[in-house]
Image (cartoon, grey):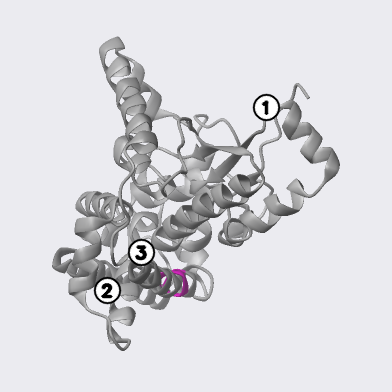
Amino acid sequence: LAMDIVPLFETIADLDNARQVMRAAFELPAYRRWIAGRGEIQEVMLGYSDSNKDGGYLASNWALHKAAAALREACVARGVRLRLFHGRGGTVGRGGGPSYDAILAQPAGAVDGALRLTEQGEVIASKYADPESGRRNLEILAAATLEASLGRRAPHPNRERHVEIMEALAGHALRAYRLLVRETPGFLEYFRASTPLEEIAALNIGSRPASRRVSERLEDLRAIPWVFSWSQCRLMLPGWYGFGSAVEAWLQEKGGSLEELREMQRGWPFWRSVLSNMDMVLAKSDLGIASRYAELVPDARLRTEVFGRISDEWQRTRRYLLEI
């Protein structure tokens, strides 16, 4: 009873299945006795970095949001208090962004007076190296936790429609992202040649190897070098790719309008946070520098095809973001 058991859900499929997994665990008599011995508190960790690498920015954010709400429902039904552990990184592609906004963007009831989150690497130095900055950042976390727990907001009158829209957008974004990353022949070859992945992997600056095992598979590459590599070539791809295609596909469906997305931006903290973080990432990207990195890809056909698709999606994403 002295040891916490903290389930971790971090791929898109894991997050979608989190409620069923915890419900099954709560049905086990031994597990119920363990929870009773821990004061009826269940901690669950959500993986931001790997869910992004698995499904892209928009689909990952929505899967995490849904999982938080679903886990709360599963715990409340069994009289268990949920404490979510957010495994966030420093960059937007790994779940980063302003902590205050991220906490307020959580589903209603998902904070409930307590949360845990990771502060990693360069974030520790930037936030806590100076005592005054450290105190300020801790005050921000405490204030956001109190506000999210006690400042109950009435649901938006069009909330069901907003959820329906998000479900559609996330589905389109997931398909666009995986079409590039998983289904484009030679994509990993392009990625390894056009980013300093090998150099990053050789640096003695990480706590773990760049890959989980000796392999060329994307699934085995850790999220930190994946995001860091895209940052170094200035594409910042994990922080935006798929959004433009998702909005365009959704608008082409019957009944979709930009005004509905603007209404969501005005009235839904989750959507506002998603757009704000993506806005920041796009501002940090630079297609001119990225095109120079792309010249390192020896296969001219592959270079032209992949960089052309990324560039087109960047323009599409920027256009729709600004229209919203």
The kind of residue tagged 1 is Gly
Q: Which residue is mark 3?
A: 241
Tell me which residue sits at (32%, 17%) in the image.
134
Whole-angstrom CA distance, mark 2 to mark 1, is 53 Å
Whole-angstrom CA distance, mark 3 to mark 2, is 10 Å
Residue 323 spot, x, y in % from top left = 14, 68
Q: Quadrant of the C terminus?
A: bottom left
Residue 39: mark: 1
User: Compared with residue 212, is residue 274 higher up or lower down, i.e. above or below?
Assistant: below
Whole-angstrom CA distance, mark 3 to mark 1, is 43 Å
Q: Which residue is mark 2?
A: 312
Q: Element at badge 1?
A: loop
Q: Are marks 2 and 1 in contact (CB under 8 Å)?
A: no
Of tags 3 and 2, which is closer to the observer? 3
User: Compared with residue 115, is residue 70 higher up or lower down, i.e. above or below?
Assistant: below
Of the pair 143 and 87, the residue shown nearer to us: 143
Residues in magenta, as a range = 173-177
Marked residue nearer the N-terminal end (3 or 2): 3
The kind of residue tagged 3 is Tyr
Horizontal side, residue 15 vs residue 247: left or right: right
Q: Element at badge 3?
A: loop
Q: Magenta span has 11?
A: no
Marked residue nearer the N-terminal end (3 or 1): 1
